[in-house]
Image (spheres, grey):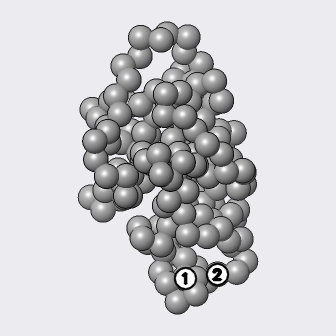
Amino acid sequence: MNQNAEMEYINSLLDSEDSSIPVFDRHQGEESKGSTVVDNSQGNMYQLLSVSAFNVAIPVIEQMCIINCEKSNFSDNDLFHEGNNYHIVDVSSLINPSSLESTTGQYVLLEKRGLALLCDEILEKRMIDRETICWRNEDSQRKWLAGTVKKDNIILLDIRSLQDELNT
């Protein structure tokens, strides 16, 4: 398999002019707690992260805090911060599995999930209208990829599916 297959696939989703890509909201009708779908009372607010030249969005409802790596202790794939243990997920290795794992950058801590998402840079928070999201099919090989916003070149992470994948 081509080492850049993941990046090529994601680029093809963002570059596609085909409006017939199946749109499927895998969490529609479910509670938004812990999923990438944020109900209207949460305002569809997402935190944008810069990862491997992509903009990645996570729901603000999932986020606990943002830290620089110098402020915490590390052991293997774990980060210890203020008495809590977080499993480190290098988001760039999801997008490009051939990339070397790093511990430098910024972390978004997801307290409820026990995860620390490593990214290159924390960008702004912004509203994302559900109507602009091309939701991915549940049968996708990349369960962590909830969908894309083509016009803004944004990848949405499905935190629940990512955690399920890590736990298997």
Q: Position of residue 83 (x, y in %)?
A: 52, 89
Along the line of sight, which residue is nearer the eye, 60 or 110?
A: 60
Left or right: 136 with respect to 88?
A: left
Q: Position of residue 111 (x, y in %)?
A: 47, 72
Residue drawn at (28%, 47%), measured in percent from left and top?
Answer: 30
Q: Position of residue 51 (x, y in %)?
A: 64, 47
Q: In which quadrant of the rendered view does residue 160 lie?
A: bottom left
Q: Which residue is mark 2?
A: 72
Residue drawn at (47%, 51%), measured in percent from left and top?
Answer: 41
Q: Which residue is mark 1?
A: 80
Label 1 secondary element:
strand
Which labelled disc corresponds to residue 139? Answer: none
| Mark 2 residue crowding within 10 angstroms, few (<14) / some (14–19) / many (20+) | few
- Quadrant where the N terminus sits is top left
* Residues tagged 2 and 1 counted as in contact (Cβ below 8 A): yes
Q: In which quadrant of the rendered view does residue 96 lie?
A: top right
Q: What amino acid is at disc 2?
A: Ser
Along the line of sight, which residue is nearer the eye, 92 or 64?
A: 64
Residue drawn at (41%, 11%), measured in percent from left and top?
Answer: 20
Q: What amino acid is at disc 1?
A: Phe
Left or right: 164 with respect to 65?
A: left
Rendered position, 19 above or below 90: above
Left or right: 35 with respect to 66?
A: left
Left or right: 101 with respect to 19?
A: right
Rendered position, 158 above or below 72: above
Along the line of sight, which residue is nearer the eye, 93 or 21?
A: 21
Residue drawn at (37%, 52%), measured in percent from left and top?
Answer: 32
Q: Is residue 5 visible?
A: no
